[in-house]
Image: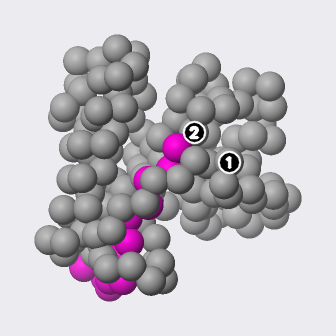
Amino acid sequence: MGFGNPCRSDDAVGVYVIDELKKKFSNRTDISLLDMGTGAFEVLFKLKGHQKIILVDAVLNSGEPDGTVFKVPASEINTAPQDDPMVFLHSIKWDQALSYAKKILQDEYPEDISVYLIAITDTRLEMNMSDVVKAGGDKTIDHIANDILQLA
């Protein structure tokens, strides 16, 4: 699952990663590659039946240089579901998405979830990512491709 806004410069990195993985693994029917964009709550229902989930998103204010890649297990981040009807009308972030998925799927919620975060500072209204963040996206693509190949 890749999160991000392709109209906000480096924030597009999660979507970029998913687009590139779709090219690499177009022949694999056992893998779902989901572009979550900035507010794709309905995609959460597609998580049902999956054994492993990998999320990719940009992270602001990490204190690290742009393009730095972090990998954390989702269990490190526990966000309580928010019973706010307005969340569906606006953007949903990956930690919120996971909290809602856990609430909705209950016993069918997959336990094997990893999160790749790529450090960014530029979220200007612009269609191009910086080279350094794109390089961080490329590193993330390599990591995820290796994870996928190990599942085969």
**97 falls in the magenta region:** no
- Tell me the kind of residue under disc 1: Ser
Question: Is residue 28 positioned above or below 114 on the image?
Answer: above
Identify residue type, mark 2. Answer: Ile
State the SS at label 2. Answer: strand
Quadrant of the drawing holding the C terminus: top left
| Residue with the most extreme right position | 83
Residue 68: quarter of image:
bottom left
**111 over 72 or under it: above or below:** above
Front-lying residue, 11 or 65: 65
Q: Which residue is mark 2?
A: 113
**Residue placed under numbered mark 1 in the picture:** 75
Query: Residue 25 at x, y = what percent?
Result: 24, 27
Looking at the image, which is closer to me, 64 or 79?
64
Give yes or no for contact between labels 1 and 2 (Cβ–Cβ under 8 Å).
yes
Residue 8 makes an appearance in the image: no
Tell me if 82 is positioned left or right of 45 in this view: right
Residue 116 appears in the figure:
yes
- Pointer 1: residues within 10 angstroms few (<14), some, or many (20+)? few
Which residue shows up at 29% across the image and 33% down it? 146
Q: Quadrant of residue 5?
A: bottom left
**Element carrying mark 1:** helix
Q: Magenta stretch: residue 123 in it?
A: yes
Quadrant where the N terminus lies?
top left
Q: Which residues are magenta?
A: 114-126
